[in-house]
Image (spheres, rainbow, N blue to C red):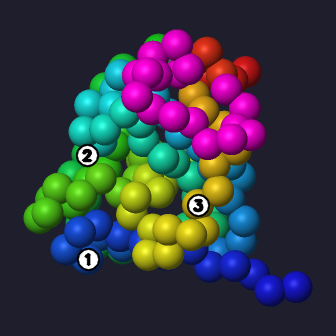
Amino acid sequence: MTTKTFKGGCLCGALRWEADGQPDYMGLCCCGDCRRASGSGFIPFIGFPASALTITGPSRQYRCQAFRGGVSTRNSCPTCGGLVFGGEHGQSDSHTIYAGSLDDPSLFKPTMLLFERERPDWVVPPKGVTRFETMPE
């Protein structure tokens, strides 16, 4: 069995990531924070355990309150501003990789849509995704 490698990074290439193996999940989030962070109607995301990821390069962090009351941390490149991953590198058990940073975007296959209740009408979800009003349990 061949292990698939996912790779990506920011616009200028200073902040890079690589993950071996299959992700835990892939989806789209339409919450207000993700819409504002992405400048779009949603953020496409991929979840990996921290142990599967290698992250290199500098990052600038932005923290805000998460839906369930904790802290959400987004990491972008301090040079180009490209949004790359979520979580505290070196501290979090898992990370959200923003699928727009993939070197090979054909690897992204979303199975869920989060925050259906905040989805703009002009965002048309892919066929077959499971929709959640907010966050799944």
Secondary structure, mark 2, is strand
Report the disc number at residue 63.
none
Q: Are marks 2 and 1 in contact (CB under 8 Å)?
A: no
Residue 124 within the segment the image draws in magenta: yes
Using residue 65 as the reference point, say whether residue 129 is left or right of it. Answer: right
Residue at numbered disc 3: 108
Residue at numbered disc 1: 13
- Mark 2 vs mark 1: which is more N-terminal? 1
Marks 3, 2: nearer the viewer:
3
Q: Position of residue 63 (x, y in %)?
A: 29, 33
Question: Is 113 located above or below residue 83 in the figure?
Answer: above
Which quadrant is the C terminus positioned in? top right
Q: Nearer the viewer, residue 69 or 45?
A: 45
Q: Residue furthest right?
A: 1
Marks 3, 1: nearer the viewer:
3
Residue at numbered disc 2: 61
**Residue at the image position 31 percent from the left and 38 percent from the top:** 40
Which residue range is magenta in the image?
A: 115-131
**Residue at the image position 24 percent from the left and 58 percent from the top:** 82
- Mark 3 vs mark 2: which is more N-terminal? 2
**Residue at the image position 14 percent from the left and 63 percent from the top:** 80
Secondary structure, mark 1, is loop
**Residue at the image position 53 percent from the left and 21 percent from the top:** 115
Q: Magenta region, mostly helix, strand or loop?
A: loop
Using residue 34 as the reference point, say whether residue 129 is left or right of it. Answer: right
Q: Amino acid at mark 2?
A: Gln
User: Does residue 27 show up?
Assistant: yes
Q: Position of residue 51 (x, y in %)?
A: 63, 64
Q: Sort mark 3 into few (<14), some (14-19) or many (20+) by Cα contacts within 10 Å.
A: some
Q: Amino acid at mark 3?
A: Phe
Q: Sort mark 1 into few (<14), some (14-19) or many (20+) by Cα contacts within 10 Å.
A: some
Q: How far apart, in angstroms, are the residues tagged by discs 3 and 2?
A: 24 Å
